Image (cartoon, rainbow, N blue to C red):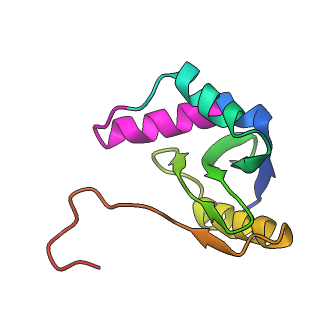
């Protein structure tokens, strides 16, 4: 926040989120679904999905796509610039967690799997 990173949420970020996620996957040499499939996924979940976007000086830095129920919010997709503004992704998760807590959602699940982790790493 000190650096001027702002967090916003809304379905209007669907295309920008898709681009950040797709480019993040590309940097990891992974494929990602086509935009039409991503859009169907997001729109199909209606009121049970949120898109969060971190911006700094008008540039989108990172995003989260989080389906949720009253039980849990699931960090399913996320993406960022190759070098996002310092602290942008941490602030993004923190604000998402606070948002879901305000909605009465009981937990925030980072889901995640690390691709090819070093042996004996956590």
Q: Is residue 23 magenta?
A: yes
Q: Quadrant of residue 1?
A: bottom right
Rendering coords of residue 109 (x, y %): 56, 68
Q: Quadrant of residue 113?
A: bottom left
Q: Quadrant of residue 19?
A: top right
Vertical relation: 122 (above or below) 51: below
Q: Is residue 21 left or right of residue 103?
A: left
Rendering coords of residue 91 (x, y %): 67, 66
Residue ID at (52%, 44%): 81
Q: Nearer the viewer, residue 14 or 91?
A: 14
Rendering coords of residue 3 (x, y %): 72, 63
Q: Say whether residue 86 is visible.
A: no
Q: Nearer the viewer, residue 3 or 55?
A: 55
Q: Nearer the viewer, residue 4 or 30?
A: 30
Residue farthest along the right direction in this orientation = 102
Q: Is residue 88 left or right of residue 80?
A: right
Q: Which residues are magenta?
A: 16-31
Rendering coords of residue 12 (x, y %): 78, 32
């Amino acid at each position: 926040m000190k650096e001027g990173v702002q967090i916003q949420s809304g379905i209007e970020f669907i295309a920008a989120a898709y681009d950040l996620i797709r480019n993040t996957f590309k940097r990891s040499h992974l494929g990602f679904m086509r935009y039409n499939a991503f859009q169907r996924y997001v729109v199909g979940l209606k009121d049970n999905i949120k898109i969060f976007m971190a911006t700094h000086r008008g540039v989108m830095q990172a995003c989260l796509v989080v389906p949720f129920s009253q039980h849990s919010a699931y960090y399913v997709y996320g993406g960022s610039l190759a070098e996002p503004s310092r602290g942008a992704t941490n602030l993004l998760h923190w604000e998402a967690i606070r948002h879901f807590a305000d909605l009465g959602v009981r937990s925030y699940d980072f889901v995640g799997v690390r691709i090819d982790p070093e042996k004996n790493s956590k």
